Image: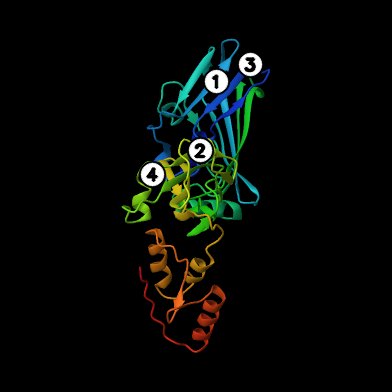
Amino acid sequence: MKASRLFLAFVLLIAGGSVALSQNQVQFDINIPNYDVVYVSDLVDVSSGKLKQGLPEMSITLRNTAPAQIFLRVRIELQLREGPRKVVVDGRSEPFDLNGVMRLSARDLAGRGALIKFLDRNTDWIDDNDEVAKQIRSHIENFPTLPVGNLFISVAAFNPINPTVSIGDLRHTITIRNSSESEVVVTLVSPEHGQNVPTPFPTFTWTSQKPNVTLYVYEKLPVHRSAEEAVTGIPYLKRDLTGISTFTYPADAARRLEMNKTYLWFVETRVVTTRGDLTRRSEVRLFRVHAGGGDNALARLLSTLPGDVASQLQQLMSDGWDPSGITLDGSPINQGELTALFQRLARENTEVNFRVED
């Protein structure tokens, strides 16, 4: 059945970096990118179930110590989330000669090369009476990418003369954590937007589903009309980081932050898909290096106002406005008095108009 050939193609494409070395005669080396997101239409001709040929980075290398005729057996089990496993491929190749080292390309694995041909033996694995099989079929018919779950792969080599004893094998488990690049999220924690930090060596904190991220810091200049315009230039700091979610601005950085200046920061990660590498970026946040330091509580309070006031205030802060004080009828009031005023106006359903003066 086409569906089983389709899943065979999936696994041969995403089982990247797995190496099986043993004392048997045949050794395997599978070199394929570890895709985060796999699109069906990019890898497989759905109408024919055949693997596409335009993937030069994909290869499987076989090695043996003495010339021999062998065949390959491939078994693949799919597990949706934490459910039971289902055998979706149980196939074998035709016998072929292996003498030293052989590299199988994407064209070979698609069954259109001169080296080997795969014969699919399991053509009736989707059974309407099998609940797991129905879930798998439903996903294939309704979604463009491989489902979240696990794939358990085994590839073994056999001598046609004694087809019951393996002379080399590979076992690998692939954990598929995302069925779409939009599921990969990077979230900033601190500094908060508009916050004043008392040191030119602030500590940045974020959360990311991917362990490899890049931290960017830019200066916000008066000529920049927006945060997005500011982050198109040369960064003050660009640092590739792995396996951490907090980083302090280094004292030995080529460019140091300066007091009383405004900066922008964000974190991005890379999502590897069969349509190329995609970048997932967090929001862009603004902070100031200010001797007063601490969280700008007034800015945070103003940002909670209803309607479009909060968005307008955020744009003003991005343009460099620092809401460090406020007056009522010409007299300064503190944060507590402002909070009490907002609460009273809210209880009385009073309409309030705001004006920001420079």
Amino acid type indicated by mark 1? Leu
**Is there CB contact under 8 Å for labels 1 and 2?**
no
C-alpha separation, residue under disc 3 versus residue under disc 1? 10 Å
Element under disc 1: strand
C-alpha separation, residue under disc 4 versus residue under disc 1? 30 Å
User: Mark 1 — residue?
Assistant: 62
User: Where residue 118 sits in the image (x, y, percent)?
Assistant: 49, 29
Given this view, does label 3 or label 2 mark the residue nearer the observer? 2
User: Mark 2 — residue?
Assistant: 240
Element under disc 2: strand
Q: Which mark is residue 47?
A: 4
Sooner in the amino-acid sequence: mark 3 or mark 1: 3
Taking depth in this image into account, of 171 and 289 the one nearest to the observer is 289
Amino acid type indicated by mark 2? Asp
Given this view, does label 4 or label 1 mark the residue nearer the observer? 1
User: Where residue 29 sits in the image (x, y, percent)?
Assistant: 56, 24
User: Mark 3 — residue?
Assistant: 25
Element under disc 4: loop
